[in-house]
Amino acid sequence: MPEVRHRTAAPTTGIAVLTAGLVVAFIAALALGAVRIPVAAVVRILVGLVSPGGIDPAELEVPLRRAYAIVYHIRFPRAVAALFAGAALAVSGAAVQGLFRNPMASPDILGISAGSSLGAVLAIVSGVAIIHPLALPGASFVGALAAATFVYTIATSRVGTHLIFVILAGLAVSSLLSGLVSAVLVFAEEYALSQFIFWTMGGLEGRTWANVVVPIPFIVVLVVALSLFANPLNLLSLGEEQAHSLGVRVEAVKVAILVLASMATAMAITLAGPIAFIGLMVPHLVRMVTGPNHRTLLPYSALAGAIFLLLCDVIARLLFAPYEIKTGIVTAVIGGPYFIFLIIRYQRRGTV
């Protein structure tokens, strides 16, 4: 299959810079919060965890033992969840924007957020959410995937999947599922209502290793799989007819990207709840630096999305410390104005 070459930033330098930024953001997520832990203590704990003999908390001095309990049991799984959720959302957003050839597209157009909300509210109201730590994220994942499947089924005919019908079906299904969520909440008890409202804000508090060990392997596979479509996405940027003439199986590529992006976004929601704007904003910012070549854009977006969500989570902890706000509030406050900026920018340029 022929390749489309774009002029981009030096890939090795960019990857090195973003990787260094990710390390700094990850250590900051472990060190900062209501209880400040010295960076030296965090590094010592991390080195002990990866060393062959591991680390025995009983052998640590008392201050470091306390730091170990906070880092390993509370902040480490939370930071890991932010890292993988941010990467999944950003890569999914970059792939969907490339597929639709629209920098303002995001995985939300597939009805994933509304589907995850319906799954979550049914789990909360029915009491299933308290059975197991993975019950609520599992229900949200099933709901998100079911919504995306419904959208794809509506938008697909015998002649193929038309992207404009994907958008229209996504809007219709999202409206339908949002109405069903409201209907369920009418009959919900006050505790279930408040629990659902907090979940919809998106957040990483309370994450444990039980919450992250299952979704992470799937996210890794899905992100790698989406990255393999870099060259077909480059060719699709020339138009579907041109891509088809260059050997791209256009319909198969469209279906694969929609399915993979839906699953990756749904998995991210199981880790962090419905975090907004990462799939829209991060790929767009990365594209401004790297250019439109998806061979560079997708891995850069993964790293930048992980960094962005880690830093937003740190801000959520520090802004009103010792109290913390939902991470989704921070991403919304940053992403909302940026989306307005994009709308105004493209209006003035006369493009969509």
Image: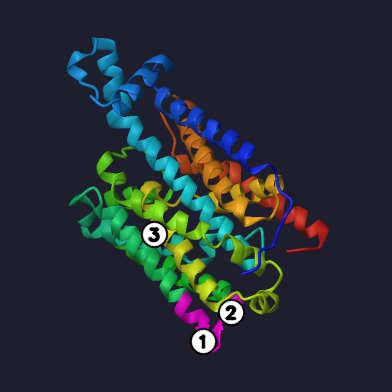
Disc ID at residue 117: 3
Quadrant where the N terminus lies? bottom right
Asked whether 251 falls inside the magenta stretch, the response is: no
- Of marks 1 and 3, the one in the foreground: 1
Residue 117, quarter of picture: bottom left
Asked whether 161 falls inside the magenta stretch, the response is: yes
Residue placed under numbered mark 1 in the picture: 157
Q: Residue furthest bottom?
A: 158
Q: Do the residues under discs 2 and 1 have CB atoms within 8 angstroms?
A: yes
Residue placed under numbered mark 2 in the picture: 162
Whole-angstrom CA distance, mark 3 to mark 2, is 26 Å
Q: Which residues are magenta?
A: 152-164
Tell me the amino acid under the disc marked 1.
Ser
Tell me the amino acid under the disc marked 2.
His
Task: Examine the rendered structure and indicate whether residue 293 appears above or below residue 181.
Answer: above
Dot 3: few (<14), some (14–19), or many (≥20) neighbours within 10 Å?
many
- Of marks 3 and 2, the one in the foreground: 2
Q: Position of residue 27 (x, y in %)?
A: 44, 26
> Is label 3 in a helix, a strand or a loop?
helix
Q: Is 85 positioned to the left or the right of 95 in the image?
A: left
Residue 78 is at least partly visible in this image = yes
